[in-house]
Amino acid sequence: MDNRNTKVMNRFDVTSRLIAKLKREEAVIGGIGNTNFDLWAAGHRPQNFYMLGSMGLAFPIALGVALAQPDRRVFALEGDGSLLMQLGALSTIATLKPKNLIMIVMDNGIYQITGAQPTPAASVADIVAIAAGSGLANSAWAADEEDFERLVEAAMSATEPSLIAVRIDDKPGVGATRRDPVQIRERFMHGLGVREPL
């Protein structure tokens, strides 16, 4: 299935559906901008890490967490524009094969925060085809909300890294992340059990 046959969904709705499935203190890394605004609004958890200003680094950061805590499922939420800046991460992840890493790409075909300029994903680049070509065989487009939930459930018991791509609309993020990098880091480290609370 290619992305032309998928429903255009809402990022906050999809993010809320993901958070509702988390029952085991899974880590969630939210990419910059609207992706983490919606993560913050969908249900604040100490296992959420909200990125600030580091475009394209959600997957590399999540890879580090997944390797450091192999018994914890780690989700990474990233936009298409940010992923396209850091495509090398896909082949690195495919090489290292962390079975506990689940990558979710929110693809609206635009750099939304900076003025809605079109990304290559809007016309020529297929995120799932790129991921599969990078060695991530367990990559798929979510056809609709129910299919997204099915793919998440399958990924949570997979024995290889998974990538789920979702076509989303251009609605702005819901809410805004509190921009305190030290607090974000400390809360996340406490949520992962590697640091006492401040």
Image: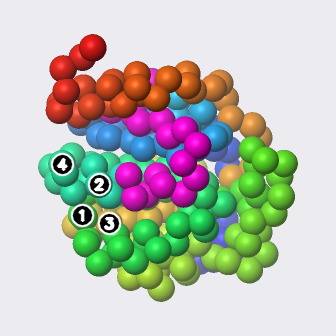
Q: Position of residue 119 (x, y in %)?
A: 75, 66
Of pointers 2 and 3, the one earlier in the residue sequence? 2
Identify residue for label 4.
69
In front here: 126 or 147? Answer: 126
Identify residue for label 2.
64
Q: Residue at x 47, y 74 (%)?
A: 88
Mark 1 Cα-neighbour bin, 10 Å: few <14, some 14–19, many ≥20: many
Of pointers 2 and 1, the one earlier in the residue sequence? 2
Q: Is residue 196 magenta?
A: no
In front here: 88 or 12? Answer: 88
Identify residue for label 3.
161
Of pointers 3 and 4, the one earlier in the residue sequence? 4
Of pointers 4 and 1, the one earlier in the residue sequence? 4
Distance CA(mark 2)–CA(mark 4): 9 Å
Mark 4 Cα-neighbour bin, 10 Å: few <14, some 14–19, many ≥20: some
Distance CA(mark 2)–CA(mark 1): 13 Å
Of pointers 2 and 4, the one earlier in the residue sequence? 2
Q: Is residue 158 above or below residue 172?
A: below
Q: Secondary structure at mark 2?
A: helix
Q: Is residue 99 visible?
A: yes
Q: Secondary structure at mark 4?
A: loop
Q: Residue at x 67, y 77 (%)?
A: 125
Q: Answer whether labels 2 and 3 touch (C-beta < 8 Å).
A: no
Distance CA(mark 3)–CA(mark 4): 14 Å
Type of amino acid under label 3:
Pro
